[in-house]
Amino acid sequence: MVELSETISVATEQDRKAFDELVHRYHKQAYNVAYRMTGNHADAEDLTQDTFVKAYRFFRNYKRDMPFENWLYRIMSNTFIDWLRRRPKAQIRSLDEPVQQEEGETLLDLPDSAAGPETLTLSRELDSEMQAALNTLSEDFRMTVILSDIEGLSYEEISEVMGCSIGTVRSRLHRGRKLLREKLKAYLE
Amino acid sequence: MNCHKVQSLISAYVDCELSGHEMLAIRQHLSECPECNAEFQSLFQVKRALGRLNSKHPHPDLAERICRRLDLVKRPIPWHKQVFQNVQDHVHSIHPRFGWAAVCLGLLAVSMVFRGGLMPAPSPYSTSPAFVVPSSVASSSLNSLFLTSQLISTSSSLAMTPITDTSSERNNWLVSTSSQQAPLDGLVLIDFQ
C-alpha cells in the first residue's frame, strides 16, 4: 500500500490518481461523520461528495501538519453550515425513524447485515434514539460531540477542525452531553 | 475543589483532558461526593453510548461517484499561471507554431528603438532647478503667495523669468533658485495644467 505522505505529495502535484486514492481511503470515515451530522443517508452522501469536491479544489491550501481526515472534517463542518444557510427550511430527518404508511410503520434505511437479529433490533433502537437526540443539538455542538465521542479526536484536534479555542470545545462538549443525557434518560438508566 | 468546580470540569475529566493535578483532585472529590460521582457516571454513559454506535456504511459505489464528480471540477488556477495561460493563448492565436518567435522579434525591435536614441529629446527644464509657473497661476495673488512661501521655505533666493510656451502661445514663469539644497535641486517639472 502506498504511504500517506507519498500519496499526498503526489496529489500536491495535481495528480488526480493520487487524490482518487485519498477518496477511496477516507470516504467511509467521512460518510460516517456526515451521516451523524445530517441524520440520513441521502444527505450524508451529498455532504460527503461536496466535501471531497471542495477538498480537491483547494487541496493546495492543505497544510501537511494536520491529518488529512481532520482537514476533511473542517471542510465538512463548513459545508454543512453552508447547506443550512442555503436551505433553512429543509427538513433533516433520520432514515432510521419510522415512517407512517398506509400499511403501518416502516423504516427507510437499509438494515445492517453484519449484526444478528436481536442485536439488530436493540442496536437500531438505540442508534435511532441517539441519532434523534443528536439532531436536536445545534450544528456546532453536534459536530463537537461527534468528533470527540464517535471519531475520538482530542480537544486540541477538535479546536483546529472547528476553528475555536480548547475552552470552547470543552464547554460545547459538556453542554452537548448534558443535553443528550436529558434526551436519552430512559435508555441510559 | 468544591462541587461547582468539579461539575464544570467533569466532561474534561471523562475525556482525560485535564492536568495531572486536576485529575487527581477530581478523582479524590468523586470518591467522597455521591452527587458529583452520579454526574460523572451519567456523562460517562453518554460518551460510551456514542462510542458504541454502529458505523454507517455508504453505498459501495460512493467513492466512484465522487471520483466521477472530480472529473468535472475546475480547480482554481493561481493568478501568475492564469496570466501566463492568457498570454500563451493569445500568442497561440497569432500563429500556432511561430507565435512566440514573433513576440520575441517584436520585443527585440522595441528594445533596439529605445537603445538607438529614437526617444524624444528630454525637456530642457527637466534638469534645471526650476519651476515652470503658468501665467494664470502666477497672476493669482493667492496661488503665487502660496507658491512663493513654499519656495522661500527651502531656498535662499528666487528668480522668476518670463518664458513663452510656443505650443500654447501663453506666457509662463520660470521660477529658479540659487539654493543647492534639496528638494529644489534638480526639480522636476510640475504640470499645472
Image: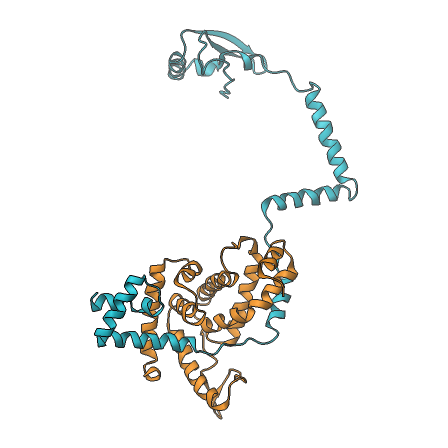
Chain colours: A orange, B cyan
A134 vs B130, nearest the viewer? A134
Q: Is residue A53 above or below residue A91?
A: above
The quarter holding residue A132 reads bottom left
Q: Locate the N terminus of chain A by quadrant.
A: bottom right
**Position above or below: A103 against B93:** below
Quadrant in which residue B153 is drawn: top left
Q: Residue at x 59, y 48 (%)?
A: B78
| Position of residue B82 measured from the top left corner of the image (x, y, whole percent) | 62, 46
**Whole-percent x, y for residue A11 in the image:** 61, 57
The answer to whether residue A59 is left or right of residue A105 is right
Where does the image place residue B166, in percent across and percent down from the top left? 58, 12
Query: Which residue reaches farthest right?
Result: B97
Residue lying at 41% horizontally and 71% vertically, measured from the top left: A149
- Residue B72 seen from this side: no
Quadrant of the snapshot with the C terminus of chain A = bottom left
Say which residue appears at 46% left-offset and 14% top-offset. B184
Viewed as shown, does residue B147 lie left or right of B43?
right
